[in-house]
Amino acid sequence: MKNDNSSHRHAAWPSWSKWLITLLIMATVGSLIWSQLPRGAYPTDLSRIGAGKPALVLAHDANFAAGMAVMELMNVIRDDYAGEVEFLVAHLGMQDGQTFASRHAARDGSVLLFSAKGELVDRLHQPQTVEALRQALAQAFGLRDCGSGKSEEACAPLPVSPDSRP
């Protein structure tokens, strides 16, 4: 009679190793999903417009991609202007967002810049680059990008006309 041990090519994996592999797969999938979530929520309280600080407001409709693309650009510059500019979102699927959009002729992807007094200073529709947003902030509010690694000279305020000061 032949020995049946040769029919078992591989020993069965211990049950703890199956659980470990399952856990690693779940952790990998979870971290992938987590990395795709938005970085930080933007306030939607539009009453902050004109409350003493310049505001950049994005009109965003979840049914379209343009607003999300602009939000990704905003994520890049948000920390550079922290404390200087309010970054807000007007959700066009909500009543207050729709009212805001009709009052200011905004649609998905529109960026509106308001002075500290609440006056509309500039409007961009679907800016394509971070530099376009930075340039609009510089022109509207006299702000420069003072992110990490920038010199004091590079961060000096830009001259702006008295009409457009925040």
Image: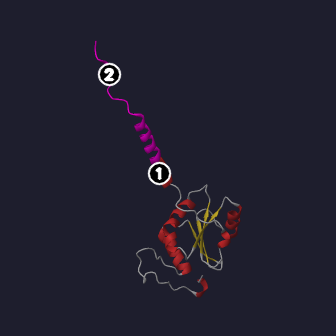
Residue drawn at x 32%, y 26% is 9
Tell me where residue 102 sits by quadrant.
bottom right
Location of residue 71 in the rendering, given as x and y in whole percent from the top left corner: 54, 63
Q: Is residue 3 above or below residue 25?
A: above
- Magenta: main secondary structure: helix
Q: Is residue 13 left or right of residue 117?
A: left
Furthest toward the top, the residue is 1
Q: Which sits in the foreground, 72 or 129?
A: 72
Location of residue 111 in the rendering, given as x and y in whole percent from the top left corner: 58, 69
Tell me where residue 107 sits by quadrant.
bottom right
If the image is split into quadrants, where does the C terminus sit?
Answer: bottom right
Location of residue 89 in the rendering, given as x and y in whole percent from the top left corner: 61, 65
The stretch of residues the image draws in magenta is: 1-28
Say whether residue 95 is magenta: no
- How many numbered discs sit on the rendered protein? 2
Q: Tell me which amino acid carries mark 1.
A: Ser
Tell me where residue 68 sits by quadrant.
bottom right
Tell me the residue that label 1 is attached to: 31
Location of residue 156 in the rendering, given as x and y in whole percent from the top left corner: 47, 84
Residue drawn at x 28%, y 15% is 2
Q: Is residue 99 left or right of residue 111?
A: right
Element marked by disc 2: helix
Question: How far, Cα to Cα, is label 1 from label 2?
Answer: 40 Å
- The mark found on residue 57 in the picture is none
Q: Tell me which amino acid carries mark 2.
A: Ser
- The mark found on residue 7 in the picture is 2
Q: Is residue 119 above or below residue 162?
A: above
Say whether residue 13 is magenta: yes
Q: Is residue 52 left or right of residue 127?
A: right
